[in-house]
């Protein structure tokens, strides 16, 4: 009898083990050909894991929540994820709300008048195609406890079809990278009429993304707007932000990298509590373009700015060396309260005037500037270097254009070609002024040419001066 019991016990153990192995024998798959609740949140379907197939009608009826049971679906006891794989093409007649305790993963096609996606953690829309007439709201981490989740927009296509359509994405991190599928490279492409808003509590990272807010302004409504905000923001690698209204990109606690990307809009604002990098970027607006950093603003030879007016403010410095700028009809303002300003090799045309103001050194060696009304260069505490620069009026017929170069320390402006009809002033409070081999032409009738070297030496060797000459201070050593 004892042996019989042992045999039965061994048989029972073998049945349990073999049965358990048989129950786990199915191979987990990402796309089983239907939507499912992912109970163990691994992004794959396996019946042996307890994952649950969702009848498509439970989604297309307009509302589905992984945590709530309904006829045809029994919710798991623990928070779970919702997966709509690439094989699914769901068209919903009414508005659609999808909610998951953990993640929402959509790789398929989804269409509805309005769609709301609400996940306790991440929302992954990699290579998905989503179409709405009115609105798409993506909120990663809203239903979770503690930290928020990520919104992954890699290779997604989001289309808002009407002029009033809106797209809003909120998450801890928002990531929109390029992805290669077969022989195709897919980028994060988002289109909406009225507005596109990407709001991250931490980081935004867009690589080659395309955002398009297409509604034209009317007498009662502004044009379509784009707003991207986060602590650190990276919009790089030929990303394109095109709006008919305002385009705003802001890094609240860190750096903004907008290198090799482009923005258009009725106005453009790029700002950061850290540095702003616009190397290789293109900014185009008939209105105001503002670039502001609590750190440094940096451009490069391939940076191009076309604006109605331009303000660049870098608390720790501004380096726009070799950039190309056109500002019309209004002025350009460049300032730094805590660093140097560099405009070396830049090409600037402005119909409204240029003012560059630094509390430290200011350099515009090799600058080519055409400016109407005024060209003002001021260094409160440092020196100014403008060798080999060319400064002339943009409109020859204007007679009010003046040029002013003022510094606390020395001014070096050798081999320059400066022309202004109203007046030219070169003034160093405490330093010498070197105008060797330079041409300064104050061309208006009785236009003053004011030269002041507070350091005691004014060098005019090989220079050509036109205008009513005023030299100071008294007793300055003039070297011809």
Image (cartoon, rainbow, N blue to C red):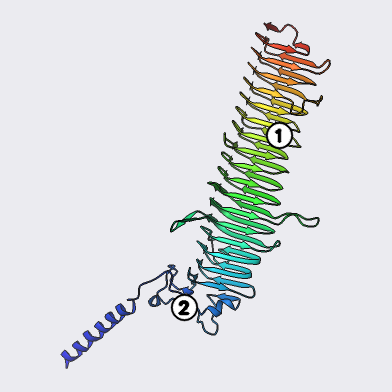
Name the residue tied to disc 2: 53
Find residue 176 and report its horizontal and vertical position in percent: 53, 55
Q: In this view, does 405 lie above or below 141?
A: above
- In this picture, residue 404 sits left or right of residue 136: right
At horizontal 63% and vertical 75% (from top left) the residue drawn is 93
Q: Quadrant of the N terminus?
A: bottom left
Q: In which quarter of the image is the C terminus?
A: top right
At horizontal 67% and vertical 31% (from top left) the residue drawn is 348
Query: In the picture, residue 162 is in which quadrant?
Result: bottom right
Foreground of the two, 311 or 218:
218
Find residue 53 and report its horizontal and vertical position in percent: 47, 78
Name the residue tied to disc 1: 333
Q: Is residue 92 above or below residue 201?
A: below
Q: Is mark 1 on a helix, strand or loop?
A: strand
Q: Which of marks 2 and 1 is nearer the N terminus?
A: 2
At horizontal 72% and vertical 32% (from top left) the residue drawn is 350
Determine which of the numbered discs, if any, sits on residue 52 in the image: none
- In this picture, residue 279 sits left or right of residue 313: left
Q: Is residue 307 above or below residue 22?
A: above
Circle 1 packing at 10 Å, graded few (<14), some (14-19), many (20+), is: some
């Amino acid at each position: 009898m004892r042996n019989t019991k042992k045999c039965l016990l061994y048989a029972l153990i073998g049945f349990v083990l073999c049965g358990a192995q048989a129950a786990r024998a199915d191979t987990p798959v990402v796309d089983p050909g239907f939507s499912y609740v992912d109970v163990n949140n691994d992004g794959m379907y396996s019946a042996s894991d307890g994952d649950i197939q969702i009848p498509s009608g439970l989604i297309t009826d307009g509302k589905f929540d992984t945590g709530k049971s309904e006829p045809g679906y029994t919710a798991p006891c623990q928070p779970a994820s919702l997966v709509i794989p690439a094989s699914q093409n769901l068209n919903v007649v009414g508005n659609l709300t999808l909610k998951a305790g953990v993640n929402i993963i959509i790789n398929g096609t989804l269409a509805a008048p309005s769609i709301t996606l609400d996940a306790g953690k991440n929302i992954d829309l990699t290579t998905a195609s989503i179409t709405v007439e009115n609105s798409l709201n993506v909120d990663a981490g809203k239903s979770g406890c503690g930290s928020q989740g990520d919104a992954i927009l890699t290779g997604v296509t989001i289309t808002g079809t009407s002029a009033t359509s809106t797209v809003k994405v909120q998450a801890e991190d928002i990531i929109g990278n390029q992805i290669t599928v077969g022989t195709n490279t897919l980028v994060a492409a988002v289109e909406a009429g009225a507005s596109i808003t990407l709001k991250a509590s931490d980081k935004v990272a867009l690589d080659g993304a395309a955002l398009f807010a297409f509604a034209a302004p009317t007498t009662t409504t502004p044009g379509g707007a784009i707003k991207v905000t986060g602590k650190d923001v990276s919009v790089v690698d030929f990303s394109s932000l095109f709006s008919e209204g305002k385009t705003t990109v802001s890094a609240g606690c860190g750096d903004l990298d907008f290198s090799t990307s482009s923005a258009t809009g009725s106005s453009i604002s790029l700002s950061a509590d850290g540095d702003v990098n616009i190397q290789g970027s293109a900014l185009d607006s008939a209105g105001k373009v503002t670039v502001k950093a609590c750190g440094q603003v940096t451009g490069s030879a391939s940076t191009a700015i076309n604006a109605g007016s331009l303000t660049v403010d870098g608390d720790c410095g501004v380096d726009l060396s070799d950039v190309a700028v056109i500002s019309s009809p209004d002025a350009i303002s460049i300032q730094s309260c805590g660093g140097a300003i560099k405009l070396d090799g830049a090409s600037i045309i402005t119909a409204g005037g240029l003012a560059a103001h630094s509390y430290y050194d200011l350099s515009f060696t090799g600058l080519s500037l055409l400016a109407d009304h005024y060209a003002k260069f001021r260094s409160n505490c440092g020196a100014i270097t403008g060798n080999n620069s060319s400064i002339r009026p943009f409109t020859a017929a204007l007679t009010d254009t003046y040029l002013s170069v003022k510094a606390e320390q020395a001014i070096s402006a050798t081999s320059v070609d400066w022309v202004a009809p109203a007046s030219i002033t070169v003034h160093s409070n405490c330093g010498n002024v070197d105008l060797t081999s330079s041409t300064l032409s104050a061309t208006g009738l009785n236009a003053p040419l004011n030269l002041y070297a507070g350091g005691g030496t004014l060098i005019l060797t090989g220079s050509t001066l036109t205008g009513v000459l005023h030299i100071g201070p008294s007793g300055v050593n003039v070297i011809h």
